[in-house]
C-alpha cells in the first residue's frame, strides 16, 4: 500500500521538477535583452522599463549612463534594473563594449544619451542600436541639436508641426536610417515648453511600441 502510493508521487515530483527546470531554461533562453543608454532625466528609460516589466520574452536588462548622479540611474535602480556608469575614456577604450557584451543585448536603445556613440560599438551591433530624436529629422538634427535647443529652434522658425524620429545609429549624429516618425501640430504652442510637452507625449506613447516591433 505504502509503495503503491509513494512511487507514483515520487515520479510525479521528478516530472514536475524536470518540467519547471525546462520551462525556466526555455524562457531565459528566449528572453530578448534591451539595454538603454541615457544621460539625464530618464523619462523615456523609465517608460520603456515599465512597458516591458511583465513581458515574458522582452526585458530591459541594464541602463548605462555617463553620469552617476543622473536621475535615470536612480529611476533604474528603483525599478530594480542594473545600472552601469562609465567615463568618456571607458566608452572608447573597450570597457563599455565588454560590459555591454556581457548583457547580450538584442537591442541597444539611446534614450537621451548625449555623447557620440563610438564606431567600434556601432560595428559590433549592426542594426541593433536605435536613437530617439525630438523632431522630424532631417530637420533640427545634428550636433548641438538636443533637448530644448530643438524645441526653441522649432518655435523660433514658426514651424506648424514637429514630432519624433526613431532611427538606427550610425557614425553621424542623427543621420542613421529612419525607422519611425510621428508628427504633431504646434500651431497652438506659445512657448517651447508647450512644444516639448507635445513631443514628450509622442515619445511616451510610441517609443516602447516601436522597440517591441523591432525585437
Ligand atoms: C528626449 O526628448 C529624447 O527625444 C531626446 O532626449 C530626451 C530625453 O529625455 N533624445 P528623457 O531623459 O527621457 O526625459
Image (tube, rainbow, N blue to C red):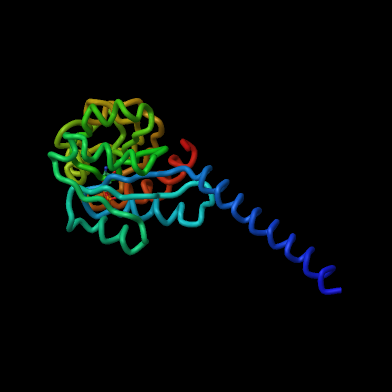
From the top left corner, tell me how far across and down residue 72 is, in percent.
26, 55
Q: With respect to residue 207, does 14 lie above or below?
A: below
Kindly give the residue lying farthest to the right in the view shown. 1
Please report the residue visible at 41 percent of the width from the left and 34 percent of the height from the top. Answer: 180
Kindly give the residue lying farthest to the bottom in the view shown. 2
Q: Is residue 17 left or right of residue 73?
A: right
Which quadrant would residue 102 be assigned to in this image? top left
From the top left corner, tell me how far across and down residue 65 is, in percent.
23, 49
| Residue 162 appears in view | no
Please report the residue visible at 73 percent of the width from the left and 64 percent of the height from the top. Answer: 10
Q: How many marks?
A: 0
Which quadrant would residue 97 be assigned to in this image? top left
Which quadrant would residue 133 be assigned to in this image? top left
From the top left corner, tell me how far across and down residue 50 is, in percent.
42, 57
From the top left corner, tell me how far across and down residue 194 is, in percent.
26, 52
Q: Is residue 183 left or right of residue 133?
A: right
Please report the residue visible at 40 percent of the width from the left and 44 percent of the height from the top. Answer: 34
| Residue 18 appears in view | yes
Task: Depth check: give the residue in front, 20 or 143.
Answer: 20
Picture quarter with the N terminus = bottom right
Please report the residue visible at 68 percent of the width from the left and 58 percent of the height from the top. Answer: 14
Task: Depth check: give the residue in front, 26 or 65.
Answer: 26
Q: With respect to residue 63, does 127 lie above or below?
A: above
Amino acid at each position: 500500500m505504502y509503495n503503491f502510493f509513494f512511487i507514483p508521487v515520487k515520479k510525479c515530483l521528478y516530472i514536475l521538477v524536470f518540467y519547471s527546470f525546462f520551462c525556466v531554461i526555455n524562457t531565459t533562453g528566449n528572453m530578448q535583452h534591451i539595454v538603454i543608454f541615457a544621460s539625464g532625466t530618464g523619462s523615456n528609460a523609465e517608460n520603456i522599463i515599465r512597458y516591458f516589466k511583465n513581458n515574458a520574452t522582452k526585458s530591459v536588462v541594464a541602463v548605462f549612463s555617463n553620469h552617476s548622479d543622473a536621475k535615470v540611474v536612480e529611476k533604474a535602480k528603483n525599478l530594480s534594473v542594473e545600472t552601469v556608469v562609465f567615463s568618456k575614456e571607458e566608452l572608447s577604450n573597450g570597457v563599455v563594449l565588454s560590459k555591454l557584451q556581457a548583457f547580450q543585448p538584442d537591442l541597444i536603445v539611446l534614450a537621451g544619451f548625449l555623447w557620440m556613440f563610438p564606431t567600434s560599438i556601432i560595428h559590433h551591433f549592426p542594426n541593433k542600436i536605435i536613437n530617439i530624436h525630438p523632431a522630424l529629422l532631417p530637420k533640427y538634427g545634428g550636433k548641438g541639436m538636443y533637448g530644448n535647443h530643438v524645441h526653441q529652434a522649432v518655435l523660433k522658425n514658426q514651424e506648424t508641426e514637429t514630432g519624433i524620429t526613431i532611427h538606427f545609429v550610425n557614425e553621424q549624429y542623427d543621420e542613421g536610417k529612419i525607422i519611425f516618425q510621428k508628427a504633431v501640430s504646434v500651431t497652438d504652442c506659445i512657448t517651447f515648453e508647450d512644444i516639448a510637452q507635445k513631443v514628450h507625449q509622442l515619445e511616451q506613447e510610441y517609443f516602447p511600441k516601436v522597440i517591441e516591433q523591432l525585437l
